[in-house]
Image: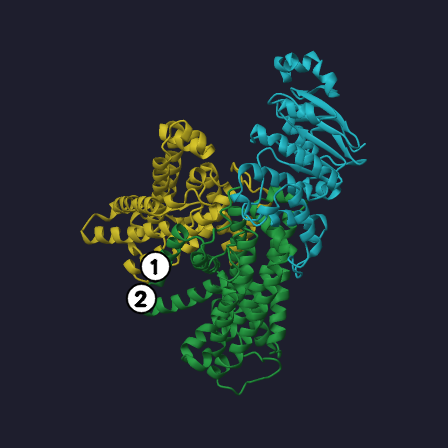
Amino acid sequence: MVFGVQKIFNLACGSFYALGAYTGVSAVAWYAGAGGPPALFVVPLVVAGLAVGAVGVVVERGLLRFVYDRDETFQLLLTFAVVLMMEDALRMIWGPAPRSTSGLYLTYGQLRVLGAAVPVYNLIVIAASLVIALSIGWLLTRTAFGRIMRAAADNREMAEALGVDMRGVYAKVFTLGTALGTLGGALVIPATAAMSEMGIELIVEAFAVVVIGGLGSMRGAFVGALVVGVLRSIAISVYPELEMLLIYLIVIVVLVVRPRGLFGGAAA
Amino acid sequence: MKRAFALVAATAAVAVAPFVVGTYHVLLMLPFMAYAVVLLGLNLLFGYAGLVSFGHALFVGIGAYTGAFITSHTKIRSLEVILLAAGVLGALAAVPVAALCVRYVKIYFGMLTLAFGMVFYTFVLKFYRLTGGDEGTPFLRPALLGLGLEAMPKIDYLTGPFYYYSMAVLGLAMLVMWRIVRSPFGLCLRTIRDNPGKAETLGIGVTRYRFLAFVISAVYAAVGGALLGPPIGNVDPTLAYWTHSGNLVFMTLLGGFASFFGPVVGAFVFIYLQNWVMSVVEYWRLVFGAILALIVIFAPEGLVGLVTRRRPAPAARA
Amino acid sequence: MMLRADGLTKRYGEFLALDGVSLTVGEGEFVSIIGPNGAGKSTLINVLTGVIRPSSGSVRFKEREVAGIGPVRLARLGMARSFQLVQIFPDLTVLETLQAAVVSRLGRGTRLFTSLAADREVQAGALEVAELFGLAERRHVPARHLPQGDKKLLDVASAFALKPEIILLDEPTSGVSTADKTAIMETLVAASRRVGLRAIIQVEHDMDIVFAYSDRIVALHQGKVLADDAPAAILSDQRVIDTVIGRRAARS
């Protein structure tokens, strides 16, 4: 989304994901400590995940907006600066040890699906991501703001000439993008632990997803994520060493054969 | 003339350092010199050809692992052989990578190089039988100009013979790069950086020159990577992680990519600053991230640029 | 016969930018291509200079098929061009820009370890062109600091520095004040003699310039060649007057 509208490849999106994860852990811990019913633990999780997305406003207004008129390289480097800062900021606030929500994961129990025991929570996450994807789709196609986003992504100067306030759009889009990242991190937390390398590891995966799906395309991100997720699972069960290697090789192949990805727009 | 004087003074300072400053600081000079070699190459790509690689740690890793392999698995100890092998392997690896990557620019180039870097990282991490996985492979003490020097205590070796050897390698690297940059080839690179479309109409084949620049930069990165090994004594996959590539670009930007000496200055400042910050505060990345942000926003021409007030080139708006 | 285009068409989806355009340029000719905006002039230039591949038709340069071979190879074969929107190397000085062209001409681009400054042939070649175009005094000025007119001159000069056999100029006097236009054209013509140019093709809007310098005029309209003749004949061609020149030329 951020790339599509702002043409910035945000290296820090993984860091935001990590931020959401850690915040989620803390939120759930607080909730459990405050005596909330376990069944509703997703509520503080989701709320925390969304709320901390406000960091996006700070990053965008405080840093990114100074480099919009510069070469893409500098924008990329600025997001790298954010990566560095967040890596340590997270470590500062939450410490270097992994954090998790342990037991709560299985609160909802498990289901037998196709002969395997699947935690209901996983199904909830899948459902949630579908809902989010559909919401974004609705936002883009049915709302005025969505239309503005698509116009800005297509032709920024034209949109500005038509009276769109790009500064406002950029601030909102970036914040929305950040919030999605933090929410994603929060949602995933019951299933895995929040670790300090989360951010810098995720960005490479996220990068694979958007390259395969097509930079700037929502549909692409969805499909790309499916492809990467499925491929990883297959790779893990067949030949664990190859897991991420396979993904990177596919990224390279995609970038060479069809740089636009499956659904992307702009050519290389 | 000012520059020549500064250069002579700097060389003299580096040469006498082991006799004047404490061991700790002398030891810090070693990674500085290794990184300076790497960055000289990276800047050929960044400052002179206008391409930002986010995967150059790949070649640093290749160089380092070449040395580690040679010393750990063979009886060869000659650093000359190691550096040569590192350079050759770096070039060989660069050929397919460059062939693919130079057809793309800017973000796509950055992403492709990042992907290649991570391929190498994953390979080195996962195939632990070969590479020692995350524990890495030992890089045993190399022989300098045929002299074994096994008997020397490690510190004496590093602050003595190895120090001056590194200095010589850096000096040679700088000399060669200076020639390259002032050659017709260097000029053609700059035309491609400034306006590839126009360069083509002047008969300058854009991809071919980028390819050459990439391979040369890879050789430098590998040689520098090999020099990184001996002081630590061990080589591990983190050398190839993408954030390490990011740091390389950071260092170049810090020093100033629009100048020849910028990268060297960048390496020096980065190493020392990092060392100092780490001793004062645990969270050096936070400080460095802020520094990078400040540079990008306020001083994209880097330290050398600030001093000479030069405008940066990759922001070319033709 | 230096350049020969046969039946060039270029389609962009439904839109036909060029429709069966044929033209020839002979030794020593100065040909101007005129036509209203959207007539296909820029497309034609881009096809002729190998930047765009035609949908059909051929372009022969010195008896060689060159359609779509790309600007790099064409430059090496002896065809150069300048641009409508001025193209320069912002951070290179005037001299360096010209040196780059000479380096390319002499095939020395892959010399990695020789000193450019010490290469007398390159230095002399670049200086010669700088003097031809009146840029010698500003030869150490970075291109982006030049006034617009000089940038335009530099764009053309660097193409000339290739010592091409044929040059295509895309609106060489556009964006330049009337007083400077003639000066540029005079410089151009003088330089072409010195450099050994064998033919010039230009796209030009200024009819005074067109009629003052051309041996032949090709009028394009909606992707087709409307007329291809000497200036005198063109002046009395009613169709051309109607679509391109306008009433005033007829009256003057």
Q: Is residue B81 left or right of residue B29?
A: right
Supply the letter of whichever chain is yellow.
Answer: A
Q: Name above or below for residue A177 compared with residue B39.
A: above
Check disc 2 and report its element: helix, strand or loop.
loop
Q: Amino acid at mark 1?
A: Leu
Q: Which residue is mark 2?
A: B281
The residue at 46%/44% (across/down) is: A225
Q: Amino acid at mark 2?
A: Val
Residue C149 position, x and y percent, is 56, 36
Q: Residues within 10 Å of mark 1 (few under 14, many from 20)?
A: many
Q: Which residue is mark 1?
A: B286
Question: What shade has chain B been given?
Answer: green
Q: Quadrant of residue B28?
A: bottom left
Along the viewing direction, whichever of A173 and B215 lies nearer the viewer: B215
Q: Name above or below for residue C215 compared with residue C120.
A: above
Residue B273 position, x and y percent, is 39, 66
